[in-house]
Structure formats: structure tokens, C-alpha cells
Amino acid sequence: MKAKVTFPKESDFFHKELCQEVQCYFETNAFSKYGNTGLVAKYILIKTLFLIAYFLVFFVHQSYLVFLLFGILGVLGIILAINVAHDAIHGIAHSKSWVNSYFKIQLDLIGANSYTWQKRHQFGHHTFPNTHGKDPDLTQTKIVKILPKATHKSYHKFQYIYVPFLYAFYTINWIYIRDFTDFFAKNSFLKKIPKKEYVKLTVFKMVYISVFIVLPILFTSFTITQVLFGHFILHIAASYFLTLALVPSHVSEHAVFVTPNNDGKMPYSWSHHQLITTTDFATNCQLTTWLLGGFNHHVAHHLFPKVSHIHYPNITPIIQQLAKKYNVPYHQENSVFQAYQSHFNLLKNNGEQATTI
């Protein structure tokens, strides 16, 4: 039987002082930890643009326009997911639970099962980011060598070249494969799944296929091949935009991958672990923050997952200041380009190292 994984006690007052400073920020400004009207307005705007783009599919007659619309739908769907559904999964998009439930469904409507993502994200990734055997986001194919000590293959030296092509299939794998694998493979973060969730999985997958494949085939002038190609373009656009948000925050050249000892004890305290394994990027760019739903302020999100992303731009400077005060490692890249470059540096470095476990 494996030992229970635990974190050692905080070695300094970094986390205590940080919580005090953040609490002071909320009290001084009389802010709620939940999303505000700005988040709701963002939802209305993105959802409206999404619906307009979708209905235009049925009125255009040029193939290049319908392909463009499918690509726009892919990007808007991800913006909706990471700005609204992500906060809702953490229960912080709105103070009312029914609003959070409604926002979570936005993820199901774009094909991704909200139940599995909530369990995978909250009880796997958030508790033990970048931890061997505990973070489900570290599960990788042998084609890509993310972990420095993973078994090395000769073709890994080319992975920084071919991985960008694999990323085009990210959401296709998520929607059509990973959701079902999570349901039926008995993962550690999915113990007893309620029967209603199996029903929800089936119904929403059918709705998704009907809305984005069947209806365009039946009620547009485009051929089945053209609609399927458009659907593929949707996923390419969605995949690249999503990896833009997800990849740099944990898988960069500064990334640290942690293994508990034989007694299940982690090497760092909980708060130090969050900083050591997480990277911020482009935190001074308001447009990036707006589009990515604060994913670029990822350290703040991991330290305060029960605070809406609308507060992260104000919390990040507090983290930076106290990390410097307590000499705790804080990783950041100044731009999205540098963040992605750092990710590919990791791929290149790991591909050249013939280290085996």
C-alpha cells in the first residue's frame, strides 16, 4: 500500500503573511472573492459572439468563410471555458451556486465533460501540481518526453519540431478520447461516479456532435467532407489557443517535477511547492490576462484557487514582493512568446538528454 502523500509544515512565514496581505486587499477595497459584473459581461459578450459565428455558418456559401467561422468558434469556445467555466468549476465565478452550475455547463456545450475536468483539475492537478504519480496532467505519451527522467528514445531529439503538430489534436483527444478514458479507466481522482454523470456525458456528447457536425451537414450547402474539415479546423484553433494558456504555466525550462519520498513526504511545504512548480507569464499585459482568464497569473491561481481570476492582477504583485522578501523562487516570463519559447527549450533539452529511469 502506497504511503499517503503529505506536505511538510511551512518553513517560514511566507504563506501566513501572504494570506494576511491578500485578506487586507479584500477588506480594504470591500471586494468579494467571487467574479463581478465584469465577468458576467465578458460571458455575455463572448457567448453572443459565439452564437453569431455559429449561426453565420448556416448563411455563408463560400467554403473559406465557413472554415474561418469554424476556427473562430474554436477560439471563442476556449475563451469561454477558461474565463467562465474554469472559475465556475472552482465555485468562484459567482456567489450563487446555480450561476456557477450554469457557467460550468458552458464547458459541456463545447464538448468537454465538466465533471471529469473538475475532478481531474481540483483533486489531481491543483493538490499536487507537477508531482509524479499524483498530477494527472503529467500523464504523457511515450512520443513526448516532458519529464527529464522519463525513458529516452532516439526520436525525442526531434520532439521540439513535431510536438507543435501534435498540439493540433489536443481538444480532439480531450473531447473524443480522454473524457471517456477518465470515466471508464477508474482513475484515482474519479472514485464513485454518480449515474447521472454518465447520462450527462452521453447527452452532452450527442448534443455537441449534433450541433457542430450533424446540423451543418443537414442545413448548409456544404458537403460532409467540408463540414468535417471545418470541424477539424475548429479543433486546431481551439487546441492551439488552449495550449497557449496551459502549457507555459507548468512545462517550461524552469519547471520542477517533484517525487515524494518512500514515506509519501513531499520535499517542500505546500506554498513553496506551488511557486516552485508554477510559472507566470505576460502578467503586465492586460489583453493576455483578459483573453486567458488570468491563466498567465498562474501562481496566484494555485495559491488562491478559491479567488476569482479577476483579482489576480492585484494579487500577483503581493506574491512577487513576499517571494523576494522570503527568498522563495518565483518564475515568470515577460511575454507569451518567451513563455512558449521556454516550453520548447524544455522539449529540446529533454530530447537531447539520454537520461533513463
Image: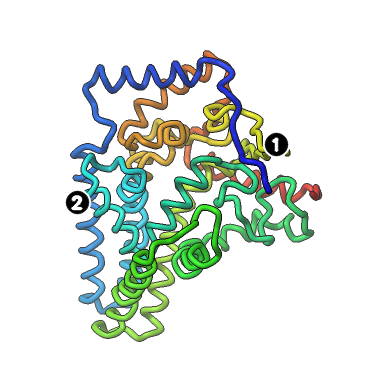
Q: Pick whichever, 284 or 96, lies toward us.
A: 96
Q: Quadrant of residue 165?
A: bottom right
SS under mark 2: helix
**Marks 1 and 2: in contact by CB < 8 Å?**
no
Seen at 29% across and 58% down, the residue is 105
SS under mark 1: loop
| Of the image marks 2 and 1, the number of the one nearer the N terminus | 2
Residue 303 is at least partly visible in this image: yes
Q: Pick whichever, 283 or 24, lies toward us.
A: 24
Viewer-side label of 2, 1: 1
Q: Quadrant of residue 238?
A: bottom left
122 horizontally vs 286: left or right:
right
Residue 180 pos. (x, y %):
48, 68
10 Å crowding of disc 1: few (<14), some (14-19), many (20+): few
* Residue type, label 2: Ile
State how many labels appear.
Answer: 2
Q: With respect to residue 168, does 44 lie above or below?
A: above
Seen at 37% across and 65% down, the residue is 111
Seen at 67% across and 46% down, the residue is 2
Residue designated by label 1:
263
Residue designated by label 2:
44
* Residue type, label 1: Asp
Determine the CA span between mark 2 and mark 1.
Answer: 49 Å
